Image (cartoon, rainbow, N blue to C red):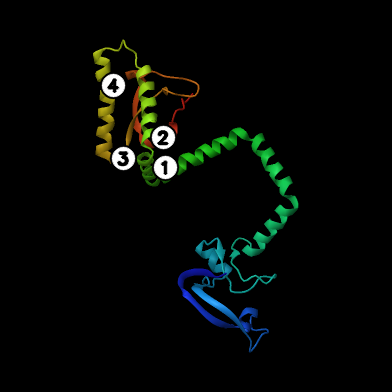
Amino acid sequence: MSRLIGNTPIIECLVRKEFCFDGERGHGEFYPAYVFGFCARPAIVTRAEARAQGLKHFFSGQPCVHGHLAERQTVNGTCLVCLKEKATRRYAERGREICDRQRELRYANHASELAKEREYATQRRVLNRDAINAYARRWAKVNRPKTAAAWARYAAAKVLRTPPWLSKEQLTAMRSFYDEAHRRTTETGKPWHVDHIVPLRGRDVSGLHVPWNLQVIPGEENERKNNKWPT
């Protein structure tokens, strides 16, 4: 299975015909061709060597029983091209049945599937934090009106959920949470957030912006929690 390594200027040339048929026929004949890049085949590795190295695929350098010169699965030695062709045939013959079955399974296990999707999304946010944050900054820069509107909604929600009867001491206590989050972020080099224990804008509940509803937690934990209220 050849892989493109690099591009070259287009070159008109002739290719020996026997090269296209593993030297079995076409000797002395040529095909007109154009060269636009150079390729290299994967290194030849035996299945035993692939197992020892923990590789998922290996290239033996020998065609499969159907004549495909391609990589194979280490677990069972199956040709990847054969797998693709088998899947294509199966979908062409039973595509509607497969889709209906997958839909039924998804509906039957809706809660667990939804939990898996949320867990995957959380892990993705944690593993790709820098890339996601960079994209968010670029998006916010391009979409300043939308960003301003979102912050305005959040600020309004916080104001509406801040009781007017809070004392000066309680307001000072609330500011101390933000000072503590800033201190921990500076000392550890990792983000710490001030979180509302009962979310201000939860789906099923709405908390207040008051000292006894605040806590300082790691940013990763806050992102996993989001607007959910653990029960």
Q: Is residue 54 left or right of residue 217?
A: right
Residue depicted at 74% across the width and 50% down the height: 94
State the CA–CA distance, disc 3 to disc 2.
Answer: 13 Å
Q: Residue at x 37, y 39 (%)?
A: 140
Amino acid type for the residue under numbered disc 3: Lys
Q: Earlier in the sequence, mark 3 or mark 4?
A: 4
Q: Counting other residues with Cα less than 10 Å from the Cα at mark 1, is it few (<14), some (14-19), or many (20 or more)?
A: some
Q: Amino acid at mark 2?
A: Glu
- Residue wearing tag 3: 190
The mark nearer the N terminus, 2 or 4, is: 4
Residue 99 drawn above or below residue 8 = above
Q: Position of residue 207 (x, y in %)?
A: 41, 19
Question: Residue 13: x percent and y percent?
Answer: 53, 81
**Mark sitting on residue 174:** 4
Disc 3 from disc 4: Cα separation: 22 Å
Query: Hey, what amino acid is under mark 4?
Result: Met
Local crowd at mark 2 within 10 Å, few (<14), some, or many (≥20)? some
Circle 3 — which element?
loop
- Per the image, the residue denoted by label 2 is 223
The residue that mark 1 highlights is 126
